[in-house]
Image (cartoon, rainbow, N blue to C red):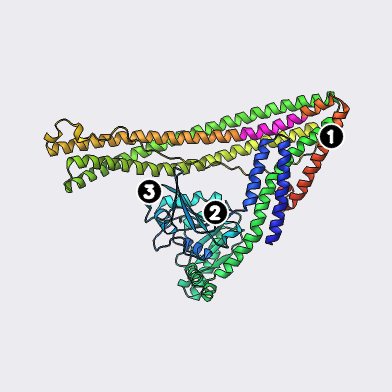
């Protein structure tokens, strides 16, 4: 199977490189760039496997068992707070990537300081993800493992982070366990998992905690509940004792590994990775190439037809064609205008949400400030030290609150923006499809409309720089005669100044956050609009170029026409050969969307 996949991948790679060469010759830079990405993905053969489930189901322990080493930290309390991405490498390494895009290389034993709720509560260290490499045969197949925070814990930010990694998944392992029934949050999360991935492996973990009779009952109950939640899906539920499996791997205790149920699960997973993994990778690449073949083929067919038409008839059809293109281009701009209107709505939503946040937290922050002052008094802190401590306290209070709010707000806005952008992408792609269909009808050439490829959006992250201004609370050295001011009077002065500065700083930094988010959203929509325009413009220009070339040739010597005809015949033959190569890699329902074939 593996050799078969490699051979098919190599054939597809060669066909894609050949198609890319033809796209470059045709000056279709957009198609050439898409094919470059296609080639990169084929060469990497990566396959992302997300480990998902509610908190404390044993996800990190399962990953350790699959890798055969104690790589990820595990504990009794909800632990994983930051996504951990594990790839194959010559030796174990760890790299921490922060939200401000900086990175730091750390020792493997130090990753708990960044990925756990205990050492990095509510992600105060502003970590985006931790990337590990591991010399594991399992990962050597091109598998990338993603250990996500558990959903359903008391830490809502963990749930949001777990959800954010679903779009990256090619398949998922979903864990539940015998000591607790499937919760509503778990089942809701599972439905979302299924909306992103083609295959989910179900594991009932911690079977070593119950006797055989209870295990049988737990398996039946979990299987029935999963089937009710996912009607029509094939549910394969694997009983497993991940901790027992890990101990067996670490001590080479094959009896313990067998008893844990890991062998059976690994066999099923490996079969999937060797067969289905290759099929999914090849099919996705073949679909992208098929789309480009259709566009290039249409242009060549129009050229062929144009050369067989009389010049007057060709010019009349070209005039009709240009009018249709103009109308479709205008329609595209109207859609993009509506897209910007939707983004204006999102910007207003950000402002509304931020105003509500500011109004809600200001009393809380002021109360926290009063409590802090009382604690400082009880500790008999000097007025000079109190001024400095108040400075630090206010900065930390506002910064931590705003950073957490900004992160949650961006997840919310990004999700809505993705839905909006995808909707408009589909509208623009419909215009592109109609452009090709109308072209085919005007010039009486064959064309089959095919499903559109997936849209890939940028997942831009924003770094919030806390702005303090020129001094929060005046230094006592700046107050004339401060040493002569009674302690109680100075305390009241500092307290009042601190309250005013807290209110001022919160307002100022809320403005900065609003600006960062709205400007980031503006950058994203501009990038999407540019991409959508380029899709349409590239197709339009390639079709127009074909017509201009045909008219030019018809108006010149017959020898030029024969030479051009010979070139186009070769190009059409090349496209047909490439199409023949990739057709077996694509599902029938993609090639024949109207036939209803399964």
Percent x, y of residue 507:
34, 34
Tags 1 and 3 touching, CB below 8 Å: no
Q: Which of the pair 20/346 is nearer the observer?
A: 20
Is residue 351 at least partly visible in the picture? no
The image position of residue 474, as x and y in percent, is 23, 34
Q: Would you say residue 521 is visible in this rendering?
A: yes
Mark 1 surroundings: few (<14), some (14-19) or many (≥20) residues within 10 A: some
Q: Is residue 20 above or below residue 68?
A: above
In this picture, which residue range is highlighted in magenta? 532-546
Residues at marks 2 and 3, CA–CA distance in whole angstroms = 28 Å
Q: Secondary structure at mark 2?
A: helix
- The residue at the far right in this view is 558
The residue carrying pointer 2 sits among few (fewer than 14), some (14 to 19) or many (20 or more) residues within 10 Å by Cα, namely many
Label ID, residue 565: 1
Q: Which residue is mark 3?
A: 124
Mark 2 vs mark 1: give the one in front. 1
Numbered disc in front, either 2 or 3:
3
Q: Is residue 540 magenta?
A: yes
Earlier in the chain: of badge 2 and badge 1, it is 2
* Residue 314 picture quarter: top right
Tag 2 residue:
193
Helix, strand or loop at label 1? It is helix
How many marks overall?
A: 3
Q: Main secondary structure of the magenta part?
A: helix
Disc 3 is placed on an element classified as loop
Residue 96: mark in rendering? none
Which mark sits nearer the N-terminus, 2 or 3?
3
Of discs 1 and 3, which sits in the foreground? 1
Is residue 48 inside the magenta stretch?
no
> In 3D space, how far apart are the residues under numbered discs 1 and 3 (Cα atoms)?
66 Å
Indicate the position of residue 384 as horizontal and vertical percent values. Answer: 19, 40
């Amino acid at each position: 199977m593996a050799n078969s996949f490699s051979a098919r991948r190599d054939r597809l790679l060669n066909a894609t490189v050949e198609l890319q060469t033809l796209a470059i010759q045709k000056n279709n830079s957009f198609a050439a760039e898409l094919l470059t990405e296609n080639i990169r993905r084929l060469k990497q053969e990566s396959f992302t496997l997300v480990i998902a489930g509610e908190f404390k189901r044993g996800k990190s322990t399962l990953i350790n068992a699959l890798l055969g080493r104690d790589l990820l930290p595990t504990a009794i309390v909800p632990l994983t707070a930051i996504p951990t991405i594990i790839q194959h490498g010559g030796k174990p390494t760890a790299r921490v990537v922060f939200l401000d895009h900086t990175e730091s290389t750390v020792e493997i034993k130090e990753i708990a300081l960044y990925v756990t709720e205990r050492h990095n509560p509510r992600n105060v260290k502003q970590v985006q993800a931790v990337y590990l490499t591991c010399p594991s045969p399992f990962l050597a197949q091109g598998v990338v493992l993603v250990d996500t925070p558990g959903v359903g814990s008391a830490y809502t930010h963990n749930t949001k982070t777990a959800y954010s990694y679903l779009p990256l998944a090619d398949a998922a392992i979903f864990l539940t366990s015998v000591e607790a029934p499937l919760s509503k949050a778990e089942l809701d999360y599972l439905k979302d998992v299924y909306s992103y991935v083609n295959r989910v492996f179900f594991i009932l973990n911690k079977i070593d905690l119950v006797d055989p009779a209870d295990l049988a009952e737990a398996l039946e109950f979990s299987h029935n509940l999963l089937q009710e939640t996912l009607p029509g899906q094939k549910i394969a539920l694997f009983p497993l004792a991940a901790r027992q499996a890990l101990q067996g791997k670490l001590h080479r205790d094959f009896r313990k590994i067998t008893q844990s149920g890991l062998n059976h699960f690994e066999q099923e997973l490996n079969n999937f990775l060797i067969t289905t993994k290759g099929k999914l990778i090849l099919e996705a690449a073949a679909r992208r190439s098929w789309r480009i073949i259709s566009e290039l083929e249409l242009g060549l067919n129009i050229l062929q037809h144009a050369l067989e038409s009389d010049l007057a008839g060709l010019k009349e059809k070209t005039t009709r064609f240009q009018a249709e293109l103009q109308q479709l281009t205008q329609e595209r701009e109207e859609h993009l205008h509506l897209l910007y209107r939707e983004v204006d709505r999102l910007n207003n939503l950000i402002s509304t949400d931020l105003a509500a946040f500011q109004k809600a937290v200001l009393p809380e922050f002021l109360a926290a400030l009063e409590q802090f002052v009382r604690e400082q008094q009880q500790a008999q802190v000097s007025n000079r030290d109190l001024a400095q401590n108040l400075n630090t306290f206010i900065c930390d209070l506002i910064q931590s609150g705003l950073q957490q709010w900004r992160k949650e707000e961006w997840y919310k806005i990004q999700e809505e923006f993705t839905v909006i952008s995808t909707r408009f992408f589909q509208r623009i792609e419909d215009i592109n499809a109609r452009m090709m269909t109308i072209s085919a009808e005007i010039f009486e050439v064959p064309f089959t409309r095919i499903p559109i490829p997936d849209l890939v959006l940028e997942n831009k992250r924003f770094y919030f720089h806390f702005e303090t201004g020129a001094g929060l609370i005046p230094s006592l050295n700046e107050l004339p005669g401060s040493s002569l001011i009674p302690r109680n009077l100075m305390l009241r002065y500092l307290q009042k100044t601190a309250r005013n500065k807290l209110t001022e700083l919160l307002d100022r930094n809320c403005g900065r956050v609003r600006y960062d988010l709205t400007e980031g959203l503006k950058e994203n929509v501009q990038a999407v609009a540019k991409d959508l325009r380029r899709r349409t413009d590239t197709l339009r220009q390639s079709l127009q170029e074909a017509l201009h070339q045909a008219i030019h040739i018809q108006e010149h010597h017959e020898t030029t026409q024969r030479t051009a005809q010979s070139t186009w015949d070769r190009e059409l033959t090349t496209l047909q050969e490439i199409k023949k190569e990739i057709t077996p890699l694509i599902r029938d329902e993609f090639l024949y969307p109207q036939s209803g074939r399964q």
